[in-house]
Amino acid sequence: MTSRKTNRPVGVIGLGSFGTAVSNLLARNCPVILYGRNREQVLEIRETRISSSQPLDSNIKLTDDVEFLCNSCDIIFPVVPSSGFRQLMGMISSFLKPYHILIHGTKGFDIKDDRENINQEGSFLSRNEVRTMSEVIMEESVVVRIGCLAGPNLAQELAEGQPSATVVASRFNEVIREGQRLLRSDLFQVYGSSDLIGVELSGVLKNIIAIASGAISGLGLGENSRGLLISRGMVEMIYLGRVLGGNTQAFIGLAGIGDLVTTCTSQLSRNFTVGYRLAKGESIENIIRTMEETAEGINTVKIARSLAKYYKVRAPITEKLYDIMFEGLSPKTALQYLMKYPFNVDIDFL
Amino acid sequence: MLKLGKSKAPVYEPILPGSENWPVVRLSRNRKEFIDQVIRESFRRIKELRNTPEMLQEEIEITMFRERLRIKENPWKVDPDDELLFWSDVKNNLVGVDQRSRNKSHLITDKLLKDIIIRYANEIAGNFKPSHYRLARTIVTVGFSRLFNAAQLKSFTGLFRGTLTLQDKIQIVGENEHIRKLAKIGTIVMVPTHFSNLDSITIGFVIHSLGLPPFIYGAGLNLFNISIIAYFMNSLGAYKVDRRKKNMIYLETLKMYSNLALQNGLHSLFFPGGTRSRSGILESKLKLGLLSTAMEAQRINFMKANGENPKKIFVVPVVLNYNFVLEAVGLISDYLSQKGQERYYMESDQFSSSYKILKFLLQFFTRSSDMSVTVGRGMDLLGNYVDDEGNSLDRKGNIIRIEDYFKIHGSFDENPQREGEYTKMLSDKLVQEYHRLARCSASHLSAYTAFEFFRSRYRKLDLYSLLRIPHEYLIIPYDDFRKSFSRRLSQIFELEKEGRIQTADHLTKKKVDELIQIGVNNVGVFHTKRPLLFNKEGDITTQDLKTLYYYRNRLEGYDLEKN
């Protein structure tokens, strides 16, 4: 059955910049079917061969038929914003079978709750109401062989063919192996990890720090401040990540510190841009309205702040970002507060 | 004591009328071939796992060393006399290995491995005899219920009246018909919770009452120390598990035995908690070894069938709901000392003589209050529920083909890492089912309420200091008890609505004050020192806080309010 292994196409769901970049990476090794739910958009891309400003590899076929996608592929990469992830899974679940392998590239949380304000005293979120994307897949479909992609993977740099690496995390070695086989190339290294939840959490939580880093640039501050932010941000990620079920190891790996440094120093990052514009005095509503693609970090700040309150975890950066975004605190005041915060131990978790 | 009603329990017809059709009888007829198969397959497996002569030699050396140590430090009556001789031989042969050329030494290690496996396989193998089974069954069902009658009716003549039967004593609720249907079309792996040494007899009774053919199960070798029990065990299809032997060769042979038995369609019984729950807490972590043999057997069945009507294995969780566990006092002491100092814990032999075990059985059947057994719905190896036809269902009730979970790129493959993860998933699912199936009774709730009351009153003390408080300080005014009991009762009903627990019938039928009466009077009712009782003023107190803690633990893991 080696023929099925090499000839069967691999599916990608999502026409966003990362979905497109992942498709192009895969296309070097195997035929790819790329799915978009908007018919006109799919037709247009089929015509122009350009998706999210990236030219498409000739090995990629486009479709708007999700049943066709699921029937044609054993391995599927869903790469859609977290806000639409559960809905997507609900839509495709009847076409997913026990033999499918899903490796997602979405870096956000899903909340299984409809309470009005998750950041009000008495209605803070616990782990029971918050799901990572792999957990959403488990809940919505029969697929159990699940993995995720995380690492310093700015779509634009990947599109330019710059060297980079990613982590495929899964409880199943075969999922990691397949991910490596399908994604690896001369310019793209693929590491494996068995800590699925830890790697997912790293990818999600680092977006908070990326926003803060953008804010530092927006305030006109330099690299000392950023160094401070990145290392304290890392500590905060680990504190939060551990109460949510991740291991410390994941956070100091490629998906943690690797991705954190990248997104905190790159103007290309959406989340960084959000922070930058916040510091320049724009309102969060205005920023959300005018962004082309979702910046996952905004929603993550809300959820992480609520979780931090519930579990009484020290998360000053998350809290102050929340105050800036939703409570009208000025970035300057927030900064002053953070500088006075009584940290006394540098690292107390290793 | 709970009132005993007239027997209303249905009696099920056996699903296979003649014993000659029982899978376990077929096995015992082909016993020799079966053992040979176990030996062959174990040999192949271990050679795969230790695939160089050096690795194999090292494994045999470790095994030999540990076995000699066991013989010296922890010998049991049941151990065969020639043990030391056998392992000395192994030792002598191993000395020879080093002095020979590579080619020859590999022949010697293979031979040694085979000899060890042969020894183990023959030790493990059960020896089922239908005539013995029938006798044993009669003794259990008739004998003990007679004894029970006599004790209940407080007269010796009660022995012959037969008005009360085990059916009255052990109430079986849940998916009885469903399990009977599954047993006709596939192989059942029954996985009960484990609280008492009597569980295997209780389960044996349940299996018989449901009209199912006998199951095979792994019984601790220590139980074979006593001739009378050994007789029962042998006749009930037991195979022997020696928990002292933790070497890889033994464990692989044991697992292969179970694996091949399941492939051959033998209904099996595992206690996946491993040993009895020392703390009284419902199993929260399961042993994966035997469960993984079911996983592997299922995959092999699928591979053999290749799409054509594969023989399916169904996992059936069963929860035993006791108000009273005879060993509670000893178990909780074990638990506390283990937890307290993590000291080396030697597998000990509790029932050292036939007399002690008989006394124990007698006490169990004459003294213990009513109990219920909840039979859960059948699941496939991935933890999906199955319907009466054995089809696996997803969460939305659609039929799914679980054989596809064992495939990659469209074809089956052997992938131990994958199956290990599936086994963990199954184990998580089982733990969840145990909690869902457990039936909360007034006695569980009373124990929980009372203990948490003490804990919050002395919240500055750690558990060990709390347990040392003199009893005269341990009194709960009735009204206070009633208040927190009622609060938790409504929490239990909430949990029931969410499908996270079940409740005994009396919880809904009776008023709070009655429930407290029933509850307090039934918590560990036959212990010499009562875990819970009313004092002269009608307030609630305890004579044994440790044992109360044991019974309280039954409701651990439900996020009940702690006070």
Image (cartoon, rainbow, N blue to C red):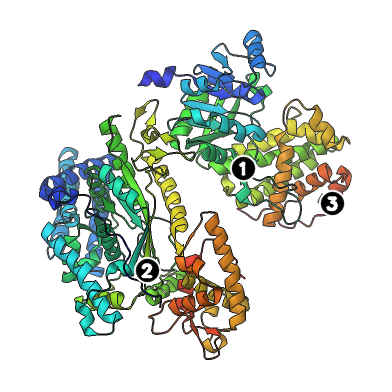
Looking at the image, which residue is at 17% across and 46% down? B39
Q: Amino acid at mark 3?
A: Tyr
Q: x, y percentage for residue A33?
A: 54, 18
- On the question of residue B193 being in view, the answer is no
Q: Amino acid at mark 1?
A: Leu
How far apart marks 3 and 1 lie (CA) works out to 27 Å
Camera-nearest label, 3 or 1: 1
Residues packed near mark 2 inside 10 Å, few (<14), some (14 to 19) or many (20 plus): some
- Locate residue B371 relative to residue A58 in the image: left or right: left
Q: Which residue is mark 3?
A: A337
Q: x, y percentage for residue A335?
A: 84, 46
Q: Which residue is mark 1?
A: A201
Q: Which residue is mark 2?
A: B371
Chain assignment, label 2: B
Q: Name the image quarter holding the C terminus of chain B.
A: bottom right
- Locate residue B321 relative to residue B537 in the image: left or right: left
How far apart marks 3 and 2 lie (CA) works out to 62 Å
Q: Name the image quarter holding the N terminus of chain B.
A: bottom left
Question: Which of the marked residues, 3 or 1, is nearer the chain's N terminus?
Answer: 1
Mark 3 vs mark 1: tell me if same chain. Answer: yes
- Locate residue B176 relative to residue A245 in the image: left or right: left
